[in-house]
Image (tube, rainbow, N blue to C red):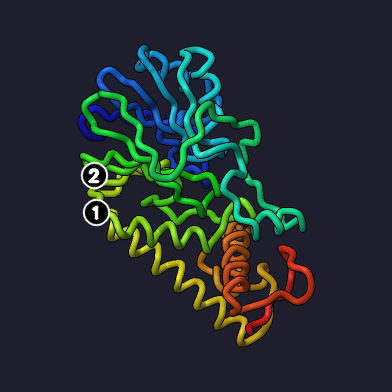
Amino acid sequence: MAPRIQRLLAPNASPMTYQGTNTYLVGDPVRFVIDPGPLIESHLREIERRAPSLQAVLVTHSHLDHSPGAAWLKEQCGATIMAFGAHGAGMSPAMRALAEHGVGGGEGADTDFAPDEELSDGDILSFGIGVGDVRALHTPGHLSNHLCFALEQSGIVFSGDHVMGWASSLVSPPDGDMGAFMKSIERLQEREDRLYLPGHGDPIPDPQARLKELYAHRRSREAQILEALRAEPATPTALVRRLYQDVPAALHPMAERNVLAHLIDLSERGLTRPRGTLTPQSIFVPV
């Protein structure tokens, strides 16, 4: 992928993971890996074979297609697991309140995940392997504990599931937070990185163009939702039927979660509100 960076593709292809999870092995010899992926022994054995001097496992976020292999590698290699925190770490008070009201979510959550070392936004990791320091960037949105990892000297960012080239990210409340997602996009737009290596799919050679595209897509969807609600108040399900007619029906449940995330964000900004207590099937009206 770049000097001293290898990509190992986990054999877990699906409509939500594309070709599979990208595990990145960094250093020569390999000193740390990013996102060891699911508990697939053949994949983890290959990581172990390629990284006999493994020091650390960096995890972008606690989803079952990214994080479970970390504990296996720790047991086999003694590597230190580093991440923002356990599942749910970094969740805003508003999202915690929603979690208590049963708004669903939790798709693919690795609730057993526990890092040995919790990283804060801006933390610098030095492995002395010729690729420069690694900076942790807290980028909540897809998940509250999501981190990107930047190789500052080379302009490379391991973007996890926050920015991918093949699809936009699922944002499913309360684990996902659309307002936080947009702020994280804005934050990355302030940087001048040259290459993103995402959690799924191919490298992104023009990060700024992709960030601009994702930001515009979300704002466009937001505008469509508001326009639809002005015509007729609706539930997330009804909005998906109106707005996602070009999307296969099998993906509509995931689209509903994204629409719900937009509606929650719009409500927090005073542009919509649910009738009664907010639930995944609330009728939303414009304000």
Q: Residue at x 54, y 14 (%)?
A: 75
The residue that label 1 is drawn on is 192
Q: Nearer the viewer, residue 136 or 280?
A: 136
**Contact? badges 1 and 2 (CB < 8 Å):** yes
Q: Quadrant of residue 2?
A: top left
Q: Nearer the viewer, residue 91 or 48?
A: 91
Q: Residue at x 55, y 68 (%)?
A: 244
Question: Which amino acid type corresponds to the residue marked 2 in the rendered image?
Answer: Gly
Q: Position of residue 114 (x, y in %)?
A: 59, 30
Q: Position of residue 257 (x, y in %)?
A: 62, 59
Q: Residue at x 57, y 74 (%)?
A: 269
Tag 2, which secondary structure? loop
Image: 33 above or below 91: above
The residue that label 2 is drawn on is 155
Q: Position of residue 148 (x, y in %)?
A: 40, 44
Q: Residues within 10 Å of mark 2 (few under 14, many from 20)?
A: few
